[in-house]
Every structure is written in C-alpha cells, then in structure tokens.
C-alpha cells in the first residue's frame, strides 16, 4: 500500500504580517538604543572637551597673573585692570594685565612682556571667552582676537584688597597689584551649570 504524502503547509498571510510587525518593533527598539548610546557618548565627549578647555584656560590665567608686571613709573604700559560687567544677570569681567611671556621663537622681535586682554563676546548666540595679546614694546598693527573658551556662561575676576573681595581694580587708581585674585568660570555641562574657581597670587604684589 502506497503512502500518500500530504503537501507541506505554508505560512498564512496573517502569520507573515505578524512576523513583519515584530521585526519592525525589534528594529525600532534597536535603533532607539543605538542612537541613545551615540547621544550619550557625544555628550560625554563634549563635557570632556569643555573640561579640557577649562583646565587649560584656568592654568593659563593663573600663570599670567602670577607673572603680572607693574611699575608706578610706567603706568601707561604696565597695568592690571579688572572691569565689572554684567551679561543678562551673569558676571562677565573684563581683564587686562601686563605679564611675562616665553619666547615664541618667531622671526618678529619680542620683548618678553605682553599685554593680555580677556573679554566675553557673543558668537552665533553663544558666549565665548576671548583672549588678545600684544607685545608691549613691539606691538603689530593688527591684533587677532582668539577664542579662548567656548560655551561659557560666566567669567568673574575678583581682587582681594586686603580686607574684602572687589570686582573692579585699576593699578592707575590703586597704585599696586592686588595681593590675590580669584577667577570663577561657569559653563553648561548638558543642562546643568558647572562652576570652577581658582586663586592666583601676583609675585610682585607686595612691591
């Protein structure tokens, strides 16, 4: 007696549609997880970059303030000036100081004494801290303004006058360098403001 083989049963249209729906749901979940990881990585990378910029900026400011130069007999070229500014309710100090600088090794003449200016400026609807320097004795005709730190929300420079912290200082009026300087920088890390403060002491403050 011959065995009668029944034809193999295929998938119904309903089963195929259910399988496609499950595949679409799984793909959506996987893509969502992937892009969430990418966004988290980008935020972490941006935060690390901001902290690197912050560390470099604070270290540069500390070194320049420590090497600040002032002489009452040369008030026009040697100065230390802090101006108190307000940027929509947040501090935005202007800082100008004369300081020592290492040789750049370039072809242009250098005195080793530079005038440095720090200011907050707005660029593309974002606040940036800019830095401008010129040689006190060999200043070029044009001076570039370089972005020192981006995505900054506050820049505050305070000087200790011997009894309290003040937000303004001018060696032409005070007749000396401040004994101590406090620098506070605030930037947004994600949606959270982060604030860092360092102190610097001009080595010639007591002279």
Image (spheres, rainbow, N blue to C red):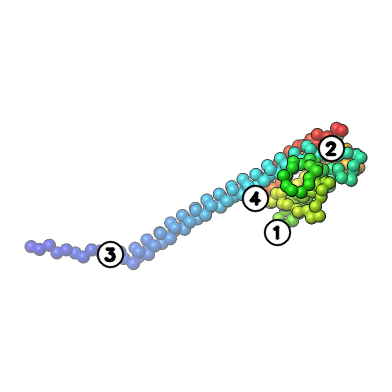
Which is more N-terminal, label 4 or label 2? 2
> Is the residue marked by circle 1 packed among few (<14), some (14-19), or many (20+) residues within 10 Å?
few
Q: Nearer the viewer, residue 82 or 192?
A: 82
Q: Which residue is mark 1?
A: 124
| Residue at the bottom extreme of this rendering | 13
Counting from the top left corner in percent of width and height, residue 94 is at 80, 48
On screen, residue 29 versus residue 49, left or right, reads left
Q: Residue 191, labelled with which disc?
A: 4
Q: Which residue is mark 2?
A: 178
Residue at x 86% of width, y 43% of height? 78
Residue at x 69% of width, y 51% of height? 150
Counting from the top left corner in percent of width and height, residue 207 is at 87, 33
Observer able to see residue 49: yes
Q: Which residue is mark 3?
A: 10
> Is the residue marked by circle 4 packed among few (<14), some (14-19), or many (20+) residues within 10 Å?
few
Mark 2 vs 3: CB contact within 8 A: no
Mark 1 vs 3: CB contact within 8 A: no
Q: Is residue 207 above or below residue 5?
A: above
Q: Secondary structure at mark 4?
A: loop
């Amino acid at each position: 007696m011959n065995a009668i083989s029944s034809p193999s049963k295929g998938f119904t249209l309903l089963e195929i549609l259910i399988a496609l729906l499950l595949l679409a749901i799984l793909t959506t979940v996987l893509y969502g997880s992937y892009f969430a990881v990418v966004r988290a990585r980008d935020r972490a990378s941006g935060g690390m970059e901001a902290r690197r910029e912050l560390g470099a900026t604070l270290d540069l400011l500390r070194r320049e303030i420590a090497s600040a130069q002032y002489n009452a007999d040369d008030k026009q070229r040697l100065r230390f000036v802090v101006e108190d500014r307000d940027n929509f309710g947040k501090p935005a100090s202007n800082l100008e100081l004369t300081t020592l600088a290492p040789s750049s090794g370039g072809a242009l003449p250098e005195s080793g004494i530079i005038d440095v200016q720090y200011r907050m400026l707005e660029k593309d609807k974002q606040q940036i801290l800019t830095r401008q320097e010129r040689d006190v004795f060999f200043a070029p005709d044009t001076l570039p303004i370089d972005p020192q730190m981006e995505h900054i929300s506050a820049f505050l420079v305070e000087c200790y006058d011997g009894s309290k912290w003040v937000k303004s200082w001018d060696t032409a009026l005070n007749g000396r360098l401040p004994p101590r300087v406090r620098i506070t920088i605030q930037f947004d890390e994600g949606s959270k403001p982060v604030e860092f403060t360092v102190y610097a002491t001009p080595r010639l403050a007591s002279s």
